Amino acid sequence: MTVWTAGFGVPDLAARSGLSTDALGRLLTDETLTSIDDPRIVAAGDAAAPSGQPLRMSCQAAGPLGVQAANTVLARIAGPSRKC
């Protein structure tokens, strides 16, 4: 697991890994913040470009993205829901 916590910057890890990124180097994700290239990868904050939306690099945008990323990971851990 890699956690990048510096603001207003994007690590080059995604680009160096061959994953799809935007012009600023942010990982391209779907609406659940899952990489469009690898479903095992979730991004948030300044390092994510969800659904191609140009979000401003700020704590105002990063906070909700962190919540969404956590929800995505927790849902995966829980697995598919079972109906009785």
Image: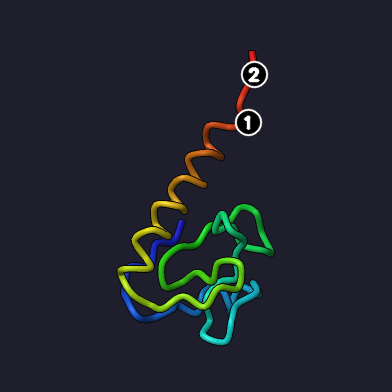
Percent of width and height locating residue 56: 41, 78
Name the image quarter holding residue 22: bottom right
Percent of width and height locating residue 26: 52, 76
Q: Residue furthest right?
A: 37
- Residue labelled with disc 1: 80
Q: Residue furthest bottom?
A: 23
Comparing 58 with 40, the one in front is 58
Q: Name which residue type carries label 2.
A: Lys
* In the displayed structure image, the side of residue 80 where residue 49 appears, left or right: left
Q: Which residue appears at 56% of the width and 54% of the height?
A: 32
Residue 3: mark = none
Comparing 37 with 52, the one in front is 52
Residue 83: mark = 2
Q: Which residue appears at 60% of the width and 65% of the height?
A: 29
Q: Nearer the viewer, mark 2 or mark 1?
A: 2
Q: Name which residue type carries label 1.
A: Pro
* In the displayed structure image, the side of residue 63 where residue 2 appears, left or right: right
Question: What element does badge 1 sit on?
Answer: loop
Task: Work out which quarter of the rendered image holds the C terminus and state it.
Answer: top right
Comparing 2 with 27, the one in front is 27
Q: Tell me if mark 2 has few (under 14), some (14-19) or many (20+) residues whose alpha carbon lies within 10 angstroms of its own.
A: few
Question: What element does badge 2 sit on?
Answer: loop
Percent of width and height locating residue 3: 39, 62
Name the image quarter holding residue 82: top right
Q: Which residue appears at 55% of the width and 73% of the height?
A: 53
Q: Tell me if mark 1 has few (under 14), some (14-19) or many (20+) residues whose alpha carbon lies within 10 angstroms of its own.
A: few
Q: Which residue appears at 50% of the width and 79% of the height?
A: 12
